[in-house]
Image: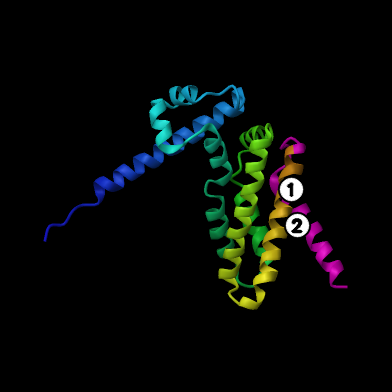
C-alpha cells in the first residue's frame, strides 16, 4: 500500500494561512493610517506584495477584511480561556478572568484606530453589532460545555449576555479615555458594577 506524505499539503495550508494573515494585517494598517474609504484593494495588494486577484481568493471585499479583525479567533480564544479557568469559579468570574487574560494581547492604538473605522458608516456599525450576537452564542455554548446541567442553560445564557455587555462598555470607556490606562482597569470596573447589581437583586 502506497503511503502519501501529508507534508506538501501541510506546507500549502501554512502558506495560505500566512498569506491570509498578511492581507488582513496590511489592510488593517492601511485602514487605520489612510481611512477605510481611501484605502483600495489595489493599495492593499501592492503593500502586501501580492496581486489583486489573490486578495479575492481570501476576501470578497474590504468589508470582509475589516470585519475579520473583529471576528478573527475571538470566540475560539475566549472558549479556550474560559475552559482554562479553575473549576471553583462562578461562571461570571470565569468569563471575567478569561477576558482579562485576553486583554493583555490587545494592541491599543491599532484597536482604537480600527474601531473608529468600524463606526464610520452605518453598514459597518450594523455588521459590528451583529458579531456580538455570534460571540454571545459561542460563549453560551462554552459555558454550557463547562457547566453541562441543562437546568442552568438559561442562566448561563444570561451570564454570556451580561458579560459581553460588560466587555463592550469596558472597551467603549477604554477607547474614550484614549487607551492611556490598561484595558483590564475598565474590565474590572465594568464587572464590579455588574456584580454589584446582581447582589442588589438577591437582597
Reading the image, the residue beneath label 1 is: 170
Residue 194 is one of the magenta-drawn residues: yes
Residue 192 percent coordinates (x, y): 79, 58
The answer to the question of whether label 2 and label 1 lie on touching residues, with beta carbons closer than 8 A, is yes
Which residue is found at the position 74% from the left and 54% from the top?
188
Which residue appears at 70% of the width and 70% of the height? 155
Q: Callout 1: 10 Å neighbours few (<14), some, many (20+)?
A: many
Instruction: Name the residue rendered at 68%, 31% in the picture.
Output: 120
Q: Is residue 128 left or right of residue 145?
A: right
Residue at the image point whose x is 20% and y is 52% from the top: 5
Residue range in magenta is 176-203
**Of pointers 2 and 1, the one earlier in the residue sequence:** 1
Q: Quadrant of residue 177?
A: top right
The secondary structure that most of the magenta stretch takes on is helix
Which of the pair 132/18 is nearer the observer?
132
Residue 64 percent coordinates (x, y): 53, 38
Is residue 26 inside the magenta stretch? Answer: no
In the rendered image, the residue lying farthest to the left is 1
Q: Residues within 10 Å of mark 2 (few under 14, many from 20)?
A: many
CA–CA distance in space, label 2 to label 1: 9 Å
**Marking on residue 58:** none
Q: Quadrant of residue 2?
A: bottom left
Quarter of the image where the N terminus is located: bottom left
- Please name the residue that numbered disc 2 is placed on: 191
Please, what secondary structure does the residue beneath circle 2 have?
A: helix
Examine the rendered structure and indicate whether residue 191 appears above or below residue 31: below
User: Residue 140 location in percent, x, y?
Assistant: 62, 63
**Left or right of residue 90: residue 1:** left
Amino acid at each position: 500500500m502506497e503511503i502519501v506524505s501529508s507534508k506538501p499539503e501541510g506546507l500549502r495550508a501554512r502558506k495560505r494561512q500566512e498569506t491570509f494573515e498578511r492581507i488582513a494585517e496590511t489592510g488593517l494598517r492601511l485602514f487605520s493610517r489612510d481611512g477605510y474609504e481611501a484605502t483600495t484593494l489595489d493599495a492593499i495588494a501592492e503593500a502586501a506584495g501580492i496581486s489583486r486577484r489573490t486578495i479575492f481568493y481570501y476576501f470578497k471585499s474590504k468589508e470582509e477584511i475589516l470585519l475579520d479583525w473583529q471576528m478573527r479567533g475571538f470566540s475560539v480564544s475566549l472558549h479556550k480561556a474560559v475552559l482554562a479557568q479553575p473549576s471553583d469559579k462562578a461562571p461570571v468570574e470565569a468569563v471575567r478572568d478569561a477576558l482579562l487574560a485576553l486583554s493583555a494581547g490587545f494592541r491599543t492604538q491599532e484597536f482604537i484606530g480600527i474601531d473608529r473605522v468600524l463606526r464610520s458608516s452605518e453598514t459597518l456599525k450594523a455588521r459590528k453589532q451583529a458579531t456580538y450576537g455570534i460571540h454571545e452564542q459561542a460563549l453560551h455554548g462554552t459555558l454550557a460545555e463547562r457547566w453541562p446541567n441543562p437546568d442552568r442553560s438559561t442562566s448561563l445564557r444570561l451570564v454570556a449576555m451580561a458579560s459581553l455587555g460588560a466587555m463592550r462598555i469596558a472597551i467603549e470607556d477604554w477607547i474614550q479615555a484614549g487607551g492611556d490606562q490598561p484595558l483590564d482597569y475598565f474590565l474590572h470596573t465594568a464587572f464590579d458594577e455588574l456584580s454589584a447589581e446582581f447582589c442588589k437583586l438577591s437582597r
